[in-house]
Image (cartoon, coloured by chain):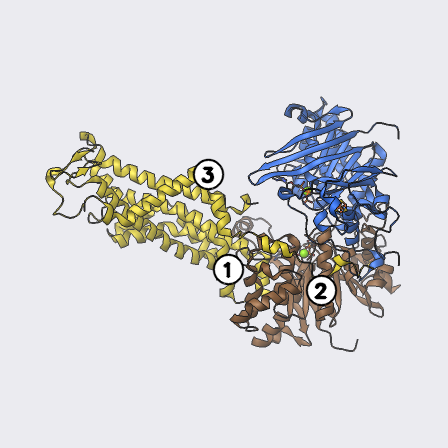
Amino acid sequence: MSASDPVDTPTVTDTTEAQTATVDTPLRRFLSDYCDSPLAVGAAVVLFLIILIAIFAPWISPQDPYDLAVVSIFDARMPPGSYAMDGTPFLLGTDGAGRDLLSAIFYGLRISLSVGVAAGIIAIIVGMSVGLAAAYAGGRTENLIMRVVDLQLSLPAVLIALILLAILGKGVDKIIIALVVAQWAYYARTVRASALVERRREYVEAAACLGLGHARIVFRHILPNCIAPLIVVGTVQTAHAIALEATLSFLGVGLPPTEPSLGLLIANGFDYMLSGKYWIAVFPGVALLITIVSINMVGDQLRDVLNPRLQK
Amino acid sequence: MSEPPVLEVSDLKTHFFTKAGVARAVDGVSFSLARGEVLGLVGESGSGKTVTGFSLMGLVDAPGRVVGGSIRLGGEELVGKSERDWRSLRGRKIAMIFQDPMMTLNPVLRVDTQMIEAIRAHEDLSEEAARERARAALARVGIPSPDERLVAYPHQFSGGMRQRVAIAIALLNEPDVIVADEPTTALDVTIQAQILYEVQKLCADTGLAMIWITHDLAVVGGLADRVAVMYAGRIVEEGPVGEVLDGPLHPYTRGLIGSVPSHNRRGRRLTQIPGMAPSLLALPPGCSFAARCPRADSLCTAMPELVPTEGDRAVRCHHPHRADEPAIEGGSA
Amino acid sequence: MSKQPLMRLDGVSKRFAKRLDTAEKIVNFFGGDRREEVVHAVDRVSMDIADGEVVGLVGESGCGKSTLGRVVAGVHAASDGKVFWRGKDVSTLSGAERRDALLKIQMIFQDPMSSLNPRMRVRDIVGEAPRVHGLISAGEVDDYVDKMLLRVGLDPGFRMRYPHQFSGGQRQRVGIARALAVEPDFLVCDESIAALDVSIQAQVLNLFMDLREELGLTYLFISHDLGVVEHLSDRVVIMYLGRVVESAPTEELFAGPNHPYAQALLDEVPRIDTRKRVFQPIKGEIPSPINPPKGCHFHPRCPHAFARCREETPALREIAPGRLSACHLNDG
Ligand SMILES: Nc1ncnc2c1ncn2[C@@H]1O[C@H](COP(=O)(O)OP(=O)(O)OP(=O)(O)O)[C@@H](O)[C@H]1O
Ligand SMILES: Nc1ncnc2c1ncn2[C@@H]1O[C@H](COP(=O)(O)OP(=O)(O)OP(=O)(O)O)[C@@H](O)[C@H]1O
Ligand code: SF4
Ligand code: SF4
Ligand SMILES: [Mg+2]
Ligand SMILES: [Mg+2]
């Protein structure tokens, strides 16, 4: 009787369900979750605009602020809303050398962002490899690596960068090195923590049962599941890197004057603060602030969205 | 039997207002509980058992809300009480035991501190008297050398002991009703048996009434007097344990019982209920079991009511089985 | 049983040592007394599993069932003792032979969520290993995956889905399809249905029984649910604190367990066909595997314990054809 029961056939499948299933990819879920907070969407839009500006600075700036043929010292320190002698407006005024401040900020964003992002990417790669190696190797190797990481994290990043730059000198490459050294440990710790959790999951054991190689297990199975926290830490740390670079440049140990990042612009304008020419320092400062705040807000929302514990 | 029930729940509705829609986790649940009675509440995962328990304790948190119905405990209406009133009721009149005893226990406080606090929250008692009562409660749930155990921290206990301490805490103020939410699911068989043994004795000796939430029909069979089967937020069948397990009326109950491996069907295929429970957010109109039900027909697009049948039973189905059909097809062989 | 067993364990032990960390070493330096803790998760277990047999492995939490299963599946290497696969000591196998032996034994896990990689589609979860091992070519992956999905009763239309888009029972089927994809002879099922709803458990149990018939699989079925084990197994092995205490054909065991622990365990199990019974539990807690009692591990809880039990470990001996038990009472 039970054998002839129609519900008892071994291949009970829900065919209808397969057809009506929505294409619910992780990306789609992620986007819909991200858009929950209008504030975060706003921040993402602002950040996107900032990135566009940084990429297209040479084409959208009213002036090439570093073309000596265009810049005239007679236009120096003009307040926001003035006009050049040839009639081009200086929306945000000009700096001490007569450069259009808006253009200088666009170019400054370009430099600040590229230094920050380059440092971030290299630090992620270094930190990720070290963290994965530590988690997968375990034992003594892990202990050694993690002691170095702890040591590094116990020192303030500014201090590390300052010491390094004092030794290395100025230069784009030098500051990137300094930023990477100051930040890789955050990534290493993050990746190790999530890799340790993932390594104990049963799917890793299943992969071992299926005779898959170590490299495949680490890179194809474990790593993709550690990406989410890495993205979160990555955004926040990139904001830190940009701020750190600005600080160092402001202190005069970061980028050379030939690479005028936002930090350098602020430093240059700082001299004029007391004489009431606030805009030369304040506008680059505001640009820096908006950049960092928007990155951090995006990072916060990413953390909420990507946090597996908050997911249903 | 003429005694009025301690707990009477009627048409209880607890809904969750989520982004994706309204989840009717508990949707019109009614039952009553007499003194000393154990009611087994069984059902698929997500059918609303825990939410029912939380509603009885006034513990439903946002986005959930009790949106209707009534809970009468000893004649007193609980729905609509303020949080303050709830706090004075909880522990004193009705208490809950969770699957994870650490929901009840604070890991950084000694057991005696926690127990004495729990007593003195409701009663003006001297510390000595409170300690004595705590000791007695531990002894009653079968904890050996309760004096030593009183001064221990929760992490010094094994899982089963911890659960027994949690039960002892629930007993401290001699509530009328205890809601136990899968308290033995995480425990080993022999430890589970120890706890079931203590609970059984307690209910018989003190007249304590219990709601025992579980998905294990076998535990219900051994422990409970009555059983209520939940599916998708509603009770689909209710009645005395023996009658329901031996002659289930509802097709879901039948499928559930047929799914459990048992002595006399070794090696044979089990009855399987095809498909899975529907999402509470997209319940079909009519009977929510229809998509999986072998008896479903056009009538079932209308929601059946929970109708009383003979022998103090009730079933929510347009085409119930007969009570004298054997629970398991071919099982009598 | 003159035939060579498919799998033979010979005195297999598995120990886990919890090493001292730096803080504890410092404590010791100042005169503290922190020792390395060694857990004898599996203690000198020997057993044979015949081709096509279903062996149920039961016992309480922490008694070493999962660890033994992992040793059998080749995930853990044994600390001591030998594991023979089709008569060959696996520790002496090399290269391709070893890989083949590994692939022939697959595990089905408890948690249907964490046993599937959340970032991979079903197609990759099921198709990866056969593709990597060259069982199929890249072009055949889709067809092969479809075949596996059909075999476990899933719609091939699910191929491009991610694990979170399935219900628990369906996920468990995906896990089974993944194991079947490398054409195993032997499945180690570690609590494979414990996390599922009762009605879904039946679906998966039926699937296991169907697969056994269709593919002639051998199973080591680990569970704490005696009802399930009784339903499925030809033989039941009962463990207590790392040791096997009884091993018997299922019907004989359930008709009359020999070992006092087996007797107690069988008594305790609530059964759906018993009503309003009075529970009469064995007293006492399960001891810690870090400091197991001397002699017979069960003696602090055993109602029949006598002096010898506290001193001497009972050996697992044959008490009837095909029945083994480890209790001094059998020396009569
Ligand atoms: N905080 C919440 N927000 C939204 N929905 C919820 C929430 N809590 C519970 N639910 C919904 O209520 C339903 C009932 O859940 P409940 O926990 O009562 O199930 P259960 O019967 O106890 O299941 P289990 O056997 O798994 O414990 C679930 O389908 C769940 O989706
Ligand atoms: N990787 C490990 N490292 C250290 N100890 C371990 C490890 N795996 C298991 N153990 C210990 O070995 C003992 C046996 O564990 P095992 O998981 O095999 O038990 P089990 O019988 O499967 O229990 P359960 O029913 O809870 O799954 C336990 O005391 C456990 O703490
Ligand atoms: S009402 Fe209809 S669909 Fe629902 S359980 Fe009864 S027969 Fe099945
Ligand atoms: S050896 Fe002794 S203690 Fe162990 S089970 Fe037998 S009688 Fe009990
Ligand atoms: Mg629940
Ligand atoms: Mg286990």
Disc 1, SS: helix
Residue nearest the observer in this picture, C110 or A195: C110
Provide the chain ID for the residue under circle 1: A
Q: Which one is earlier in the sequence, the residue at label 1 or at label 3? A: 3
Height in image: A237 above or below B111? below
The response on whether ligand 1 sits within 8 Å of label 3 is no
Height in image: B37 above or below A170? above
Label 1 close to label 3 by CB (< 8 Å): no
Could you tell me residue C53's position as x and y percent?
Answer: 75, 69
Residue nearest the observer in this picture, B258 or C195: B258
Query: Dot 1: within a 10 Å radius of its alpha carbon, few (fewer than 14), some, or many (20 or more) residues?
Result: some
Amino acid type of the residue that numbered disc 1 sits on in the rendered structure: Tyr
Could you tell me residue B53's position as x and y percent?
Answer: 70, 36
Q: What residue is shown with label 1?
A: A136
Query: Dot 3: within a 10 Å radius of its alpha carbon, few (fewer than 14), some, or many (20 or more) residues?
Result: few
Q: Is residue B266 left or right of residue B285?
A: right
Label 1 close to label 2 by CB (< 8 Å): no
Which quadrant would the N terminus of chain A be assigned to in this image? Answer: bottom right
Instruction: Tell me how far mark 1 sits from mark 2, CA to CA.
Output: 29 Å
Instruction: Tell me how far mark 3 sits from mark 2, CA to CA.
Output: 50 Å
Please tell me the colour of chain C.
brown
Residue C220 numbered tag: 2
At x 27%, y 55%, the residue is: A173
Please tell me the colour of chain A.
yellow
Please tell me the colour of chain B.
blue
At x 86%, y 54%, the residue is: C304
Disc 3, SS: loop
Q: Is residue C78 visible?
A: no
Q: What residue is shown with label 3?
A: A37
Could you tell me residue C169's position as x and y percent?
Answer: 66, 55
Provide the chain ID for the residue under circle 3: A
